[in-house]
Amino acid sequence: MHDAPTTAVEPSPGTVTEGKEPLSAGLKQRHLTMLGLGGVIGAGLFVGSGAGIAVAGPGIVLSYLIAGTLATLVMRMLGEMSAAIPASGAFSVHAERALGRWAGFSVGWLYWFLLVVVLAVEATGAAQIANGWVPGVPQWGWVLIFMIVFTAANLTAVKNFGEFEFWFATLKVTAIVLFLALSLLAVFGMLPDTEPVGLTNLTGQGGFLPHGWSGVVSGVLAVVFAFGGLEVVTIAAAESDDPARAVGRAVRSAVWRILFFYVGSMLVIVTLLPWSSMQPGKSPYVAVLDSIGVPGAGQIMNIVVFVALLSALNANLYGSSRMVFSLAQRGEAPRALLKVSQGGSPRSSEAESGGGVPRRAVLASVAFGFVSVLLNLEWPDSVFLYMLNAVGAVLLFVWGLIAVSQLRLRPRIAREAPGKLTLPMWGFPYLTWASLVAMGGVLVLMLTDDTARPQLLWSAGATAVVLLVAGVRALRERRARR
């Protein structure tokens, strides 16, 4: 491998002019569109939604509507900033321009840590499913296979990442569309041996809100983190031929469909089956497919969940490598990570053959990812549990900084480069402030919930450490300039 050095791109916090990206332009619009659609469709929806139904009953529909609306607003904020200022560091770059280096440093490293820790959960979960199919290969062997395959894919041309995610997302979206179609037919009694179900399951057993609005609120807490992953599409947009246009189209095509998939799925599930029959840890999708007589429903959903986990694993490897590369660009990570593979001049035709890939950044992220996987396999209830708790609420901190950055950058972009506001945030600044209030509300809920409180406290501790490091660095730089 031959590496071509790059130069750091250090945007000034006082302007919105964009620097030149040294990465390749191997991602096509179809990659980004499907990444935007499938990026948030994961195991949290297919399996984790059962826990939300158990606490909220049919009111889970409202819980998903509230959580999905918040995620949609965050995605729109991201889309506005990324269309105006495309960068591989996305919201980390935006935070630096809006609030200063401490903000870009903090949100970038927190997000990187989140991705490489969650990566271990995904790799282990996929390995458990694969081990059930082929028990002759031990769980650690499957983890090794997955890590090698996706590391290789991310070390070569970025189009390989795009192709993996395109087909993964296509399968997930197809599975949900087919599920919705079959479920609707069952709701109206149009499948063999079925009768119209009416509203019995929505209004019986305690009514639509069996636990009142407190159940809906608890449901929000149970499902909001399932929407994590939407951020990667704005990171990936920097490696397309026309980043501003690409991210705009991806965001526009994704936001309403994500709500449709999530809210629509929950509505047909609680219409077809009594909410009290749902069990945390059991997939409600399997329960519905079993109830309407789909043979092998459990194995079908196992395949879908398996693909969802591999998709998230691939996306997290990609997102973490680009984030740490962007941090290195701005002097917030070791400069050795600035090297990209040969042929990576901006918009180079050699991007098709693997040029412009930040291979050292990929390997650095994978190395920590391997450490996380080993900790998860050996000490899942001790060391790794502490790490997982430390990132439990980081997504909300990241979303909060995205909203604050958008509040600061929007007037600046409108003043200095109004032509770049091609994807403006709705109802600015009121909906941005409403989003911040909603995020604060979720944090308060976590503080009052016995299960979620440890995650919040550990995540707050991790965030405090990163902020302390950022503050010390800023103090040293200020003294050095004197």
Image (tube, rainbow, N blue to C red):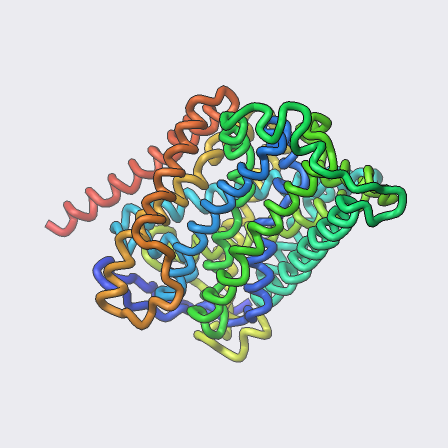
Q: Is residue 3 visible?
A: no
Q: Is residue 416 visible?
A: yes
- In the displayed structure image, the side of residue 233 where residue 106 appears, left or right: left
Task: From the top left corner, tell me how far across and down residue 204 is, in percent.
Answer: 68, 27
Q: Residue furthest left?
A: 482
In the depicted structure, whether residue 233 falls above or below residue 74: below
Q: Residue at x 29, y 42 (%)?
A: 470
Quarter of the N terminus within the rendering = bottom right
- In the displayed structure image, the side of residue 466 where residue 236 appears, left or right: right
- In the displayed structure image, the side of residue 106 where residue 349 appears, left or right: right
Tally of marks: 0
In the depicted structure, whether residue 393 falls above or below residue 434: above
Q: Residue at x 39, y 28 (%)?
A: 444
Asked whether 398 or 26 is in front, the reply is 398
Q: Residue furthest bottom?
A: 349
Quarter where residue 127 is shown: top right
Asked whether 366 or 214 is in front, the reply is 214
In the depicted structure, whether residue 155 falls above or below residue 127: below
Task: From the top left corner, tell me how far across and down residue 318 is, in percent.
Answer: 54, 55
Q: Residue at x 24, y 63 (%)?
A: 15
Task: From the top left corner, tell me how far across and down residue 78 is, in percent.
Answer: 41, 56
Task: From the top left corner, tell me how far across and down residue 76 is, in percent.
Answer: 43, 56
Quarter where residue 5 is shown: bottom left
In the depicted structure, whether residue 266 falls above or below residue 481: above
